[in-house]
Image: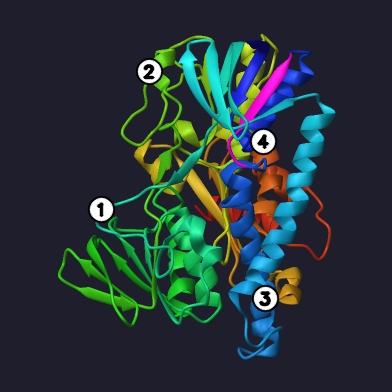
Amino acid sequence: MQSYDLIVIGSGPAGQRAAIQGAKAGRKVALVEKREVVGGASLNTGTIPSKTMREAVLHLSGYAYRDIYGISYRVKEKITMQDLAFRVQHVIKTEVDVIQAQLSRNNVEMLSGTARFTGPNTIAVEGTRGTSEYRAATIIIGTGTKPAISSKVPINGRTIINSDQILDMPNIPKTLIVVGGGVIGVEYACMFAVLGVRVTIIEKRPRLLEFADQEMVEALSYHLRDSRVTMRLNEEVVSVEETAEGVIANLESRKRIAGDALLYAVGRQGNVDELNLAAAGLESDNRGRIAVNENYETKVPHIFAVGDVIGFPSLASVSMEQGRIAAARAFQINAQSNPANYPYGIYTIPEISFIGKTEEQLTDEDVPYEVGVAYYRESARGQIRGDTTGRLKLIFHRETFELLGVHIIGDNAAELLHIGQAVFALKGKVQYFVDTVFNYPTLAECYKAAAFNGLNKLAKG
């Protein structure tokens, strides 16, 4: 039986970073991956494919330039699923090569096959060449998640699909039902709406993206409706039927929603079924999540779990950090990270990004705050880019002026946020933006405009 200092199960963002951190610490590391390629769901079916598809949709549809050249402007008149898949496959191949080179450069050994625990320190890996057993002093689980299933929604891979099957659709439907108003459902709803698809979102909660700032979600909802998206909130699907024409979703309220296709995007389930957690003295909850402490240790001290398999926030960027921190903690390496400083990027159209508290949270906590808002349309760069929908909101303490939150909706929001993230993480004050010179013309100038807007309110008060 071959021995390692560290075995990482799963080569997604969390597993990659955990393995590389272990290798950087001079440890003998193995990384187990059951797919034929590295990257996990993030690279092969989730984050990278969806964001690449979004970029292809924006480019081919000419969406960004419609305000300038007219609503009928398009780069390609008849866009097909093949057009979208072509760009996605190109990016995936390149990223797989990059990751494999990085792992090889750091002397991380790849073990191909499905891992299962045979004891607290041992795993069996079943691959095409049979089963081999391995031992490690430390094991990190980073197996990620898969789309959740429901007995009410019979996935057939053609007209009733989950998010892993989007690019397998033969054609772009004329009408699409999206069940689930979370990140995945809303991102895909936006993409198809831009392509001219009539989309209906069904969500059992009273609003979309309930963890995001309400004002930003309201702005997104306005743009969705403007793209002819119908939102059925406070509604729940009780059954889905496949018909000769497409699909019908039957709601608890006795409504019947018809469409050419249906995307089921309600939650994800941890990939733990094949792990045989019991052999290691572990268990998962009913959604396949493994409980960990602040150091990502499970209840078995030498076994860690990171990434989507431990639950919220299920962001690739956060998973990477969790993998790094877990490996550092395992080998007593000093590594600092504060989850309160993690940014969120939601790749809707327009995209949303934020860090810190929302107005709703601060109100509940009785924190005295003020808000400053700037609009893209009032900046020269916003006009040049043709984005008149974006806005940037700063939330700061009324008495100390400390930055409490940054919320952005609009073009490049996820990139633009990092300026605010630096100030937020360093506990800077809103005056920083007033006293800073930003390149002109840039969207970054919105920080200065928002700061002036908020401070002017205090002056009038």
Mark closer to the chain start, 3 or 4: 3
Q: Distance between the residues labelled 4 and 1?
A: 50 Å
Magenta stretch holds residue 30: yes
Label 3, secondary structure: give it.
Answer: helix
Residue 151, numbered circle: 1
Amino acid type at image mark 1: Ser
Bounds of the magenta span? 28-35
Amino acid type at image mark 3: Ala
Q: Distance between the residues labelled 2 and 1?
A: 27 Å
Residue 428, numbered circle: 4
Residue wearing tag 3 = 64
Picture coordinates of residue 64 (x, y %)? 67, 76
The answer to whether 114 is drawn above or below residue 153 in the figure is above
Q: Residue at x 67, y 40 (%)?
A: 38
**Left or right: residue 231 compared with residue 18:** left
Label 4, secondary structure: give it.
Answer: loop
**Left or right: residue 219 compared with residue 372:** left
Badge 4 crowding class, 10 Å Cα cut-off, few under 14, some 14 to 19, many 20 or more, is some
Mark closer to the chain start, 4 or 1: 1
